[in-house]
Amino acid sequence: MSRAFYVYCIAESAAAAQLPAASLPAAIEDDAQLEWISVNTLAALVSQVPGETYSEESLADHLTDATWTAIRAMRHETVVEYVAKRTSVIPLRFGTIYLERSGIEQMLTEKSRELEEIIEHLRGREEWGVNVYSDRAVLMSSITSVSPVLRELVERAEQAPPGQSYLMQKKIDALRIDEVRAAVNRIVDQIEARLREQADDGRRLRILKVETTEHGELKAKFAFLVKRSSFEEFRDAAERLAQENQAAGVRLELTGPWPVYNFVNPV
Amino acid sequence: MSSSFDQILVGEEWEETDISLLETLDHVLNRGLVIAGEITIAVADIDLIFVGLNVLVSSVETAQEVLRNRQTDAD
């Protein structure tokens, strides 16, 4: 049976030596163990996989099976998490496969400088995710107190004769929707700006699907690169933002620490 | 689960819960360094996979199996 090599992450050889394969979590497939392939200062964490299953055609089929994909993606994550907790590591995207061991050695050799730079850049840093949710109903009801323009209109409508009041109410309803949208954007921008001040880097991420949870609708997703030593400040800033915006129906969710999936683009 | 990869909800107080399966899969399937392997799984139609994953998560039994998998691996 042909074998291929699945690559999880890249670390420094010296760190890899402290993490013997036998101490690591389960590999992506049951019948193989993790192993480090080292070239000079760098080491790739890999495991063998059946070449038939991981051929391009076969994979396309397997990937449509959510259970198959989810189990393997979770194993990938568990392995990378384990290493990321212990050393500076470059997480690879799910599904990097080499047919020969020599291909990995060649990659480590050819890209050594770039990989070393990334590892250095990430040292002592973690990725934290921030999700921003907005509860529209809460914001709709509190928007009058947030927006002076609306407050004035509401007061005038209350004083106006019925016919005029009705028309003004229509205007207020339309304006309320615009003001809610503007308020959410303003709050999201403010959250990004203030958390960036506490982080080394930040990215706004794509929202894959519109998620509505008990906290409202997901409005923005961010990833921040944060020094371990600055995490308390980062967390305090997030907490202040959460408190300031609670009345507006905005909720923050902090997730992590993650392996630095969003900050491994070549520097 | 006692993974340190917990989700912290910020509100009146911080509370810790587990990161959702979808959140985790979103990270693993979409991101990370792309190095040209001899085969690089192009999870091209990621949205389609997420539709499948949503079905998976709503199918509690299967989702639990996947989560158990995660937990055992982490121990």
Image: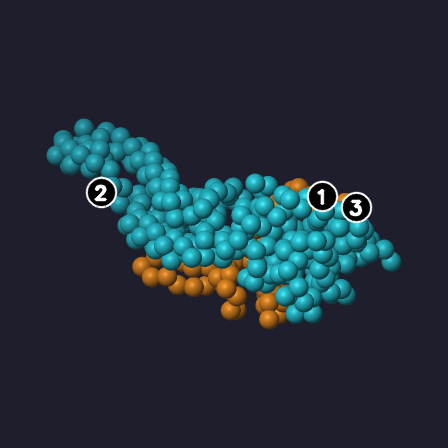
Chain colours: A cyan, B orange
Which image quarter: residue B61?
bottom right
Question: Who is closer to the viewer here, A175 or B8?
Answer: B8
What's the residue at 60%, 51% (across, down)? A90
Seen from the viewer's position, the closer of residues A112 and A204 is A112
What amino acid is found at the position of numbered circle 1 in the picture? Glu
Place of residue B64 in the rendered image (x, y in percent of width and height, measured from the top left): 59, 65
Same chain for labels 1 and 2? Say yes or no.
yes
Q: Secondary structure at mark 1?
A: helix
Q: In this figure, which residue is indicated by the disc labeled 1?
A: A110
Figure quadrant of the N terminus of chain A: bottom right
Closer to us: mark 1 or mark 2?
1
Residue density around tag 2, few if under 14, some if 14–19, many if 20 or more, within 10 Å: few
The residue depicted at 43 percent of the width and 55 percent of the height is A254
Q: Residue at x 19, y 33 (%)?
A: A153
Which label was assigned to residue B3?
Answer: none
Few, some or many residues within 10 Å of mark 3 (<14, 14–19, 20+): few
Q: Position of residue A180 (x, y in %)?
A: 33, 39
Q: Which mark is residue A145?
A: 2
Question: Can the viewer see residue A246 in this picture?
Answer: no
Sequence order check, earlier mark of 3 and 1: 3
Q: Secondary structure at mark 2?
A: helix
User: What residue sits right under mark 3 in the picture?
Assistant: A57
- The quarter holding residue A81 reads bottom right
- Asked if marks 2 and 3 fall on the same chain, the answer is yes
Identity of the residue drawn at 60% across and 67% down: B74
Q: CA distance from mark 1 to mark 2?
A: 60 Å
Q: Position of residue B12 (x, y in %)?
A: 31, 59
Q: For the residues marked 3 and 1, what is the alpha-carbon distance in whole angstroms?
A: 28 Å
